[in-house]
Image (cartoon, rainbow, N blue to C red):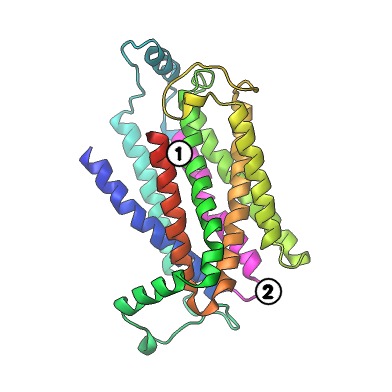
């Protein structure tokens, strides 16, 4: 168990740095006229990796032949558990494919333009005028206490809650619900559907923001909130209460779980996430223009703290 823990410890700072740097980069290469389109399309392209990851899992995993169903049945009956065992070849194929995608991503990143565009939203400082680490930390804490950041904090906390839901809580129910356990590779299709939803909403926002002023601000956030409410309500009515943390065959409140319903919920979650994140990126870019990198870092701190709290509560 030591290696997975080490990997997880290293993964969290990596995600924080990526999203903070991603937001700052998009802002440096956007103007007030292009920030909405750029934010939507850049996040949609970033989350297209969900589709790639789902396809990799489908191509590298052999059929489970009902192993998931056996696992649920045996656990419910308190007998000897069955489990899905990946071969060394499957593990090497999956991680090899993910490594190859990471290498390609870094090559693309190396050739991205570094100079900010004309009339950029971000304030780009010269190297000589950049401050040290301690001064940067002081600036972050002072920015966190500013009125605009405090008003935006609930948005970042809500984003952490929803991220925890579609990353860990709902996918777990796809494994632990007896009705869904018979579907091989449902988790891979769930990931692909998420990516489809993300890309679809990114395209919608990019197109509508050309004709509707400030569409990626409050309108996108309201749309994202409605989609989240719809997806979570359907998930609540179609998921056994205990399915988020243990195998169960309990009845649901209203709808019978099915693969089509689960994938529909996945698409809605993907669309909602893209709408909300795009709105968050645009708002962060405009809240305190002279401290954009600090604003993105603070927003990720709020999001990650809420996400971790929800995950721990669910596991408990």
Return the mark for residue 33.
Answer: 2
Whether residue 237 is visible: yes
From the image, which quarter does the C terminus lie in? Answer: top left
Whether residue 26 is visible: no
Secondary-structure class at tag 2: loop
Mark 2 or mark 1: whose residue is earlier in sequence? 2
The answer to whether residue 310 is magenta is no
Q: Position of residue 20 (x, y in %)?
A: 45, 64
Magenta segment main secondary structure: helix
> Which residue is pictured at 48% across the width and 25% down the height?
243
Measured in 3D between alpha carbons, the distance from the residue under mark 2 to the one under mark 1, in whole angstroms, is 36 Å
The answer to whether residue 42 is magenta is yes
Number of on-image labels? 2
From the image, which quarter does the N terminus lie in? Answer: top left
Q: Position of residue 236 (x, y in %)?
A: 59, 31
The mark closer to the camera, 2 or 1, is 1
The image quarter in which residue 206 lies = bottom right
Is the residue marked by circle 1 packed among few (<14), some (14-19), or many (20+) residues within 10 Å?
Answer: some
Left or right of 169 in this view: 202: right
The image quarter in which residue 39 lies = bottom right
Is the residue marked by circle 2 packed among few (<14), some (14-19), or many (20+) residues within 10 Å?
Answer: some
> For the view shown, which residue lies furthest in the left direction?
2
Q: Magenta residues?
A: 30-57
Q: Nearer the viewer, residue 261 or 253?
A: 253
Q: Position of residue 94 (x, y in %)?
A: 38, 39
> Which residue is pictured at 30% across the width and 53% down the height?
10
- Compared with 147, 300 (above or below) is above
The residue wearing badge 1 is 168
Q: Position of residue 286 (x, y in %)?
A: 59, 73
The image quarter in which residue 65 lies = top left
- Compared with 164, 170 (above or below) is above
């Amino acid at each position: 168990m030591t290696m997975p823990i080490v990997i997880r410890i290293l993964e969290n700072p990596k995600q924080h740095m990526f999203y903070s740097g991603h937001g700052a980069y998009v802002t440096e290469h956007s103007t007030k006229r292009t920030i909405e389109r750029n934010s939507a399309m850049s996040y949609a392209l970033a989350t297209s990796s969900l589709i790639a990851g789902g396809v990799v899992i489908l191509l590298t995993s052999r059929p489970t032949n009902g192993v998931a169903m056996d696992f649920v049945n045996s656990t419910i009956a308190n007998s000897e558990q069955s489990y899905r065992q990946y071969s060394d070849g499957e593990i090497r194929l999956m991680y090899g494919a993910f490594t190859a995608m990471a290498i390609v991503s870094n090559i693309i990143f190396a050739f991205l333009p570094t100079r900010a565009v004309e009339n950029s939203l971000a304030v780009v400082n010269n190297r000589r005028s950049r401050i040290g680490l301690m001064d940067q930390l002081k600036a972050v804490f002072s920015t966190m206490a500013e009125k605009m950041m405090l008003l935006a904090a609930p948005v970042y906390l809500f984003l952490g809650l929803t991220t925890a839901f579609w990353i860990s809580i709902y996918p777990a129910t796809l494994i632990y619900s007896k009705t869904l356990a018979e579907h091989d590779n449902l988790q891979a299709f769930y990931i692909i559907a998420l990516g489809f939803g993300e890309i679809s909403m990114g395209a919608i926002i990019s197109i509508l923001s050309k004709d509707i002023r400030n569409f990626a601000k409050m309108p996108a956030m309201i749309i994202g909130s409605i989609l989240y409410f719809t997806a979570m309500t359907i998930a609540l009515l179609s998921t056994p209460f205990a399915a988020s943390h243990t195998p169960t065959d309990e009845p649901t409140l209203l709808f019978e779980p099915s693969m089509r319903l689960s994938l529909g919920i996945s698409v809605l979650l993907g669309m909602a996430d893209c709408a909300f994140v795009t709105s968050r990126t645009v708002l962060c870019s405009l809240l305190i223009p002279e401290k954009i990198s600090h604003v993105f870092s603070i927003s990720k701190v709020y999001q990650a703290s809420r996400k971790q709290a929800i995950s721990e509560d669910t596991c408990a």
